[in-house]
Image: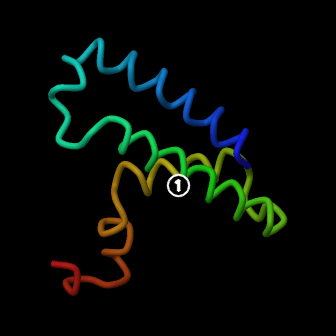
Amino acid sequence: TDRVQELINQHITRGFEQALKNFGGAEHLSLPLPLIIQFFSTSLLGIVIWWLENSMPYSAEEMANQYYQLLLNGIANTLRPALGKKLD
C-alpha cells in the first residue's frame, strides 16, 4: 500500500500543480497544498482498498463517480437527502 500511496500522491500532486498554474497558484488556497494532496490520496486509497476487499461490488466507473461525488459535494451534501434539515 505504501507504493500505491506514493503513486497516487505523485499523480494528484501533478494534477494540482497543473491546475494551480492555470488558476493562480497555491498561495490562494485556504489550506496547505500538502494537506489537500494527503486528503485526496488517502481517501482514494481507502476507497480502493474497500472496493477490492468487498469483491468490487461496483464497476470502476461507478466507483470513480461515487468518489468524485463525495469529494466535490462533500459528506454533508451527500448525506443531506437522508438526514434532511438535521445537517443545517
Quarter holding residue 86: bottom left
Q: Is residue 54 above or below residue 48?
A: below
Colouring: rainbow
For this rendering, which residue is in front, 54 or 65? 54
Farthest residue, direction top = 21
Residue type, mark 1 in image: Ser
Query: Left or right: where does residue 27 sit relative to residue 69?
Result: left
For this rendering, which residue is in front, 5 or 68? 5
Residue 22 position, x and y percent, is: 28, 13
Q: Which residue is mark 1?
A: 43
Tag 1's secondary structure?
Answer: helix
Instruction: Identify the residue at horizontal 63%, vertical 36% (top origin).
Output: 6
Q: Is residue 86 above or below residue 35?
A: below
Instruction: Identify the residue at horizontal 35%, vertical 20% (top origin).
Output: 19
Quarter holding residue 24: top left
Instruction: Identify the residue at horizontal 19%, vertical 83% (top origin).
Output: 85
Which part of the image, by quadrant, shows the C terminus? bottom left
Q: Is residue 70 above or below residue 77?
A: above
Q: How many numbered circles are shown?
A: 1
Residue 5 position, x and y percent, is: 64, 42
Give the crowd class for mark 1: few <14, some 14-19, many >=20 residues within 10 Å. Answer: some
Query: Left or right: where does residue 58 sit relative to residue 30?
Result: right
Instruction: Identify the residue at horizontal 47%, vertical 47% (top origin).
Output: 68
Q: Is residue 48 above or below residue 17?
A: below
Residue 43 position, x and y percent, is: 53, 54
